[in-house]
Amino acid sequence: MKELVIKYKSVIKFILTFLLVYISLSVVYKFYLDASKDSVYYPDYITNLVAVQSADLIDILGYDVQVVPHPDEPSMKLIINDVYLARIVEGCNSISVIILFVSFILAFSGKPKPTFLFILSGSVIIYVVNLVRIAVLSIGIYHYPEKSEILHTVVFPGIIYGIVFLLWIVWVNRFSSMIKKNE
């Protein structure tokens, strides 16, 4: 058993670090969501901000867009040209994806400064890609409502998770000291 632990020390360290960071950040995020229940920004500040910024992008593209609080559930209704198209819920705000991204980067640790800068820049990239994703998805659903299911469940999740995967590949190949130790 001891030989296995020694042999797979880096794998065990990766898994334990990933789980510790992922669970810790998820718990902090859950506290944030619980604290946001009576917030001025409905349903929570980040989801509200994502809804407003996505609407701003759609507006820039020439559409009449509104985001309004949903009366029956914690979400924002997205309306383009007086057509209610989608709900922006907490799961649309990219924070869960960013938590996953950060957990992986910290588990495949590197030097502190590059790690911090990569986490910061990668999180911004994920956030911005998510805004563009929501805007394009909404416009796509507006023009092609019959394609809404495939756009929402396949194409656009593929985009956001594809970006995360590419960022992970860049991190592992360029910055992670764990890989360099094993070469």
Image (cartoon, rainbow, N blue to C red):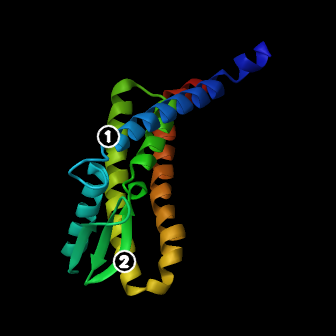
* CA neighbours of label 1 inside 10 A, class few (<14), some (14 to 19), many (20+): few
Q: Nearer the viewer, residue 164 or 93?
A: 93
Q: Which residue is mark 1?
A: 35
User: Which numbered mark, 1 or 2, is in the foreground of this view?
Assistant: 1
Q: Position of residue 154 (x, y in %)?
A: 54, 68
* CA neighbours of label 2 inside 10 A, class few (<14), some (14 to 19), many (20+): some
Q: Nearer the viewer, residue 46 or 12?
A: 46
Do tag 1 and tag 2 residues touch (Cβ < 8 Å)?
no
Q: Is residue 6 above or below residue 117?
A: above
Picture residue at 33% right of the left edge, 27% below the top: 113
Of the image marks 1 and 2, the number of the one nearer the N terminus: 1
Dot 2 amino acid type: Leu
Q: Position of residue 112 (x, y in %)?
A: 37, 25
Residue 17 can be seen, yes or no? yes
Please identify the quadrant where the N terminus is shown: top right
Q: Is residue 45 above or below residue 177?
A: below
Picture residue at 25% right of the left edge, 68% below the top: 68
Q: Which residue is mark 2?
A: 85
- Left or right of 47? Residue 13 is right
